[in-house]
Image: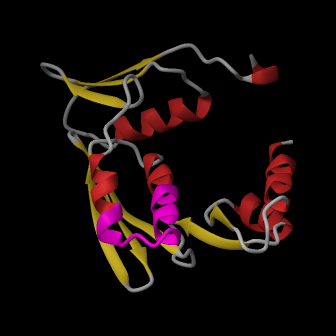
Amino acid sequence: GVISEKGKLLQSLSKKGYAILNYDDSNIRLKVAPKTRSKIFWFGENPKADLVIYDFKNQQNGSSFKLSYKNSHININWQLVGRQQTVAAAIAASVGILSGLSLEKIKLGLEKFLPQPHRMNLTKAKNCLILDDTYNSSPIAVIEAVKTLASFTNLPKVIVLSDMKELGSYS
């Protein structure tokens, strides 16, 4: 299935290219990565990754986390909520690193990124927090939305979701 197709993509990379892969995903690390001839740049929360994500915190106005590459560290404060957003940030940062950008330039770029409409948008109403994730939901998105709201303990919470489309045989 999906793992096999990812392996085929990696097989098509040249020896001079890079695959940017999530070290935290054991399927990727153990089954897919060995199929590539390219160099691998790992990211993830595991300290063995080339680019390490750590110290994640949700806040009502966004979230913060740190990235570490070699002996350099940066603190990212952006307007997105949800730990799962750090994966996209780490992929973007990895591309930046491989393209020769400094961590400071990467930080500036990430912190300019704004939440997309109806994708994990957190709003504080009178006496509660509302998480709008109505763009297109999935089982994983619902789990992440619940985890995100659970990290806020001071107010009642509401999650607004949309239909779950594109579920294949599970529809």
The part of the image, by quadrant, that contains residue 55 is: bottom left
Query: Is residue 144 shown above or below 77?
Result: above
Residue 106 horizontal side relative to residue 91, left or right? left
Look at 53% across and 70% down and name the residue there: 98
Look at 20% across and 31% down and name the residue there: 155
What is the tally of numbered marks visible in this picture? 0
The part of the image, by quadrant, that contains residue 81 is: top left
Q: Residue 164 appears at what percent x and percent y?
A: 61, 18
Q: Nearer the viewer, residue 73 or 16?
A: 16
103 within the magenta span:
yes
Q: Nearer the viewer, residue 140 or 28?
A: 28
Which residue is outermost to the top? 163
The part of the image, by quadrant, that contains residue 130 is: top left
Q: Residue 28, can we see it?
A: yes
Q: Quadrant of the N terminus?
A: top right
Q: Give the magenta range.
A: 90-106
50 within the magenta span:
no
Q: Residue 64, can we see it?
A: no
Query: Is residue 98 shown above or below 145?
Result: below
Q: Residue 69 appears at what percent x and percent y?
A: 44, 77
